[in-house]
Image (cartoon, rainbow, N blue to C red):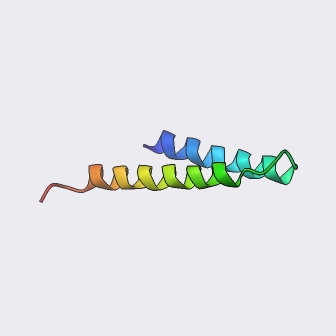
Amino acid sequence: MNIAQGSLEESRYYLILSSDLGYGDNSKLLQLLEEVSKLLESYSNNILTPDS
């Protein structure tokens, strides 16, 4: 999980950097990255929550 979260943040950083350098509009990719982030967080929470 930690590796996946780290890779997600690294991807976010490079998308922001490429946008700052003027390589194009990355807004759609950033939206998709946010969606993946939410899915990973939800998956992580479900794994770490003990069964009722």
Residue 28 is left or right of residue 18, and the answer is left
Image-quadrant location for residue 10: top right
Residue 20 is left or right of residue 52, and the answer is right
Identify which residue, 51 or 24, lies in the foreground: 24
Image-quadrant location for residue 45: bottom left
Question: Where does the image place residue 2, in percent across and percent down from the top left?
Answer: 47, 44
Question: Where does the image place residue 38, in percent across and percent down from the top left?
Answer: 46, 56
**Total numbered labels placed on residues in the image:** 0
Question: Where does the image place residue 21, in percent across and percent down from the top left?
Answer: 87, 49
Residue at 84% x, 54% y: name it: 20
Location of the C terminus by quadrant is: bottom left
Residue that extends furthest to the left in the rendered view of this protein: 52
Residue at 82% x, 47% y: name it: 24
Residue at 57% x, 41% y: name it: 7
Residue at 65% x, 52% y: name it: 28
Question: Where does the image place residue 36, in percent across and percent down from the top left?
Answer: 50, 49
Residue that extends furthest to the bottom in the rendered view of this protein: 52
Identify which residue, 16 or 50, lies in the foreground: 16
Location of the N terminus by quadrant is: top left
Residue 48 is left or right of residue 35, and the answer is left
